[in-house]
Image (spheres, helix red, strand yellow):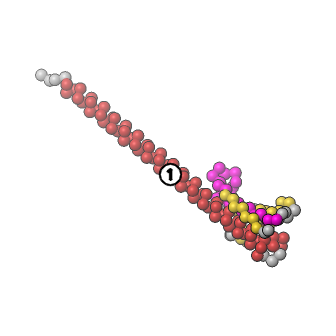
């Protein structure tokens, strides 16, 4: 005669297999989630670094335009190239200027410079962007402020 215990053991093996597969699946999903978050974090760090270097370039271009060029910012030629960008000077107020590239590609990094000569010390704001499209949610902005003159 056959024993009924053998049929119960077969069900136990299937249950054990389902539990093992479930545990392995949960570990795999956890590792995939961790990898995705690490990818996002490294992407944000890269975008932040690009923006910082653009801001550094912007502040250096502002200092160069105001100190080294003959006549300073007031005699800046149209279409002046600095940092790989063709900059256009816009007067924001008396003795306050914006240098920016109006034709910059929205998908490329870019920068803007504000030179404020309304008071001493002179202030230069260099703003760098990882993407020139400022309405994009992935755009990261970094700013460096430089003051000089006593």
Judged from this view, the residue extending furthest toward the left is: 1
Q: Residue at x 65, y 50 (%)?
A: 137
Q: Residue at x 71, y 66 (%)?
A: 59
- Residue 15 is situated, as x and y percent measured from the top left of the image, at 30, 31
* CA neighbours of label 1 inside 10 A, class few (<14), some (14 to 19), many (20+): few
Judged from this view, the residue extending furthest toward the bottom is: 70
Q: Residue at x 16, y 23 (%)?
A: 3
Left or right, residue 7 beside residue 66: left
Res. 100 in view: no
**Residue beneath disc 1:** 38
Q: Name the one closer to the observer, 119 or 87.
A: 119
Q: Which residues are magenta?
A: 120-141
Left or right, residue 25 beside residue 103: left
- Residue 37 is situated, as x and y percent measured from the top left of the image, at 51, 48
- Residue 135 is situated, as x and y percent measured from the top left of the image, at 70, 51
Q: Name the one closer to the observer, 11 or 95.
A: 95
- Magenta span has 82? no
- Determine which quarter of the picture holds residue 104: bottom right
Quadrant of the rendering where the C terminus is positioned: bottom right
- Residue 53 is situated, as x and y percent measured from the top left of the image, at 64, 64
- Determine which quarter of the picture holds residue 9: top left
Quadrant of the rendering where the N terminus is positioned: top left
- Relative to residue 29, is residue 65 depicted above or below? below
- Magenta span has 128? yes
Res. 140 in view: yes
Q: Residue at x 67, y 58 (%)?
A: 142
- Determine which quarter of the picture holds residue 86: bottom right
Q: Secondary structure at mark 1?
A: helix
Left or right, residue 29 beside residue 144: left
């Amino acid at each position: 005669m056959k024993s009924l215990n053998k049929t119960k053991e077969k069900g136990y093996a299937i249950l054990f297999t389902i539990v093992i597969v479930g545990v392995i699946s949960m570990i795999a999903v956890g590792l995939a989630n961790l990898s995705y978050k690490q990818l996002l974090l490294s992407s944000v760090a890269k975008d932040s670094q690009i923006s910082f270097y653009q801001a550094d370039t912007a502040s250096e271009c502002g200092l160069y335009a105001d100190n080294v060029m003959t006549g300073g910012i007031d005699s800046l030629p149209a279409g002046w190239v600095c940092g790989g960008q063709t900059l256009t000077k816009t007067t924001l107020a008396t003795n306050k200027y914006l240098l920016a590239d109006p034709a910059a590609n929205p998908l490329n990094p870019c920068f803007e410079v504000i030179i404020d000569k309304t008071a001493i010390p002179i202030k230069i704001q260099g703003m760098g962007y990882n993407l020139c499209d400022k309405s994009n949610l992935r755009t990261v902005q970094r700013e460096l402020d430089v003051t000089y003159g006593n």
